[in-house]
Amino acid sequence: MIQRILLRQAGRPRARRASRILLAVAAMAALLSVDMPSAAAVPPLGVTAAALPDATVARVGALFAGGLDGGHFCTAAVVHSADRDVIATAAHCLDHPDTTVFAPGYRDGKAPYGVWRLTGVNVAGDWTDRKDPDDDIAFATLAPLDGAQIEDIVGGFPVATEQPDDVTVTVLGYPSTLDAPLRCSNATSLLSETQRRVECPDLSGGTSGSPWLADGALAGVLGGYEEGGSVPEVSYSAVMGDQALELYREAAVPAG
């Protein structure tokens, strides 16, 4: 079961759609197949380095408690959606969605693309009921800012499921001790049928929710087993399967 949490300050009207089922199918096909911009040069596999500003890094941001002076505690990324207003992160990063804000491209104390408040959260029922690490992924919607949606400003990542066991991913995240993101790429392996692991150093507290990008598409988020890992050298993500895809679909192609 998927749980949709609407925040009190929400109230974003949605245009009515004719032939909803056909449009939803078409929209999901588009969202899952959009080409990505080329990323800047990255460090060798298994090496963590500063993530220099580019179009890909602009889609990743830090989650703050209340505002930029509240300290950033997790990472999130913009993903493609019909209403152009959805981010992906770890479910354990959204315990207090009513006071959480998102700053894409945050760097050196500045939010070049604005500070965005959440309007709702989509999480799996098994996460809400018992904090199942296999469901430690969430999608949240954002209120418009100055009349624009977040994806209009920075673009968004497509979502990719059914990845091979050893898929190579790029992790982009914000340690809570730094005011700029880090980047690391490496091949993954399976901890279990439902959990994926990657060896990347220095991905410490604050990087929970970081996107795992496979060929420019979201293939996981840092979280899951041990809420992402107990040491900064090894990180985890719940495997993106049918449940995660349905969760994404509920957020990205809303009915009504």
Image (cartoon, rainbow, N blue to C red):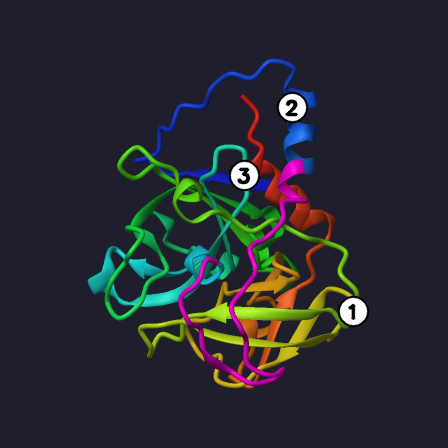
**In contact (CB < 8 Å): disc 1 and disc 3:** no
Task: Locate residue 65, reporting x and y percent.
Answer: 29, 59
**Quadrant (top left/top right/bottom left/bottom right) for the N terminus:** top right
Residue at the spot of label 1: 165
| Sequence-first tag of 3 and 2 | 2
Q: Is residue 218 above or below residue 15?
A: below
The crowding category of the residue bearing disc 1, from other C-alpha atoms within 10 Å (few below 14, some 14 to 19, many at least 20), is: some
Foreground residue among 65 and 25: 25
In the picture, the disc for residue 23 is: 2
Inspect the magenta stretch and tell me whether residue 32 lies in it: yes
Check disc 3 and report the residue beneath it: 81
- Quadrant of image for the C terminus: top right
Left or right, residue 36 beside residue 165: left
Mark 3 and mark 2: Cα distance apart in space: 13 Å
> Which quarter of the picture shows residue 136?
bottom right
Mark 2 Cα-neighbour bin, 10 Å: few <14, some 14–19, many ≥20: some
Callout 1: SS:
loop
* Residue situated in front as seen by the camera: 68 or 104: 104
Kind of residue at badge 2: Leu
Q: Position of residue 208 (x, y in %)?
A: 48, 68
Helix, strand or loop for the magenta stretch, by majority:
loop
Vertical comparison of 123 with 63: above or below: above
Cα–Cα gap, marks 1 and 3: 27 Å
Picture coordinates of residue 106 (x, y %)? 33, 63
Q: What kind of element bears circle 3?
A: loop
Earlier sequence position, callout 2 versus callout 1:
2
| In the image, residue 90 lies in the stretch drawn in magenta | no
Residue at 53 percent of width and 86 percent of height: 201
Q: Which residues are magenta?
A: 30-55
Lateral position of residue 87 relative to residue 246, left or right: left
Callout 3 amino acid:
Ser
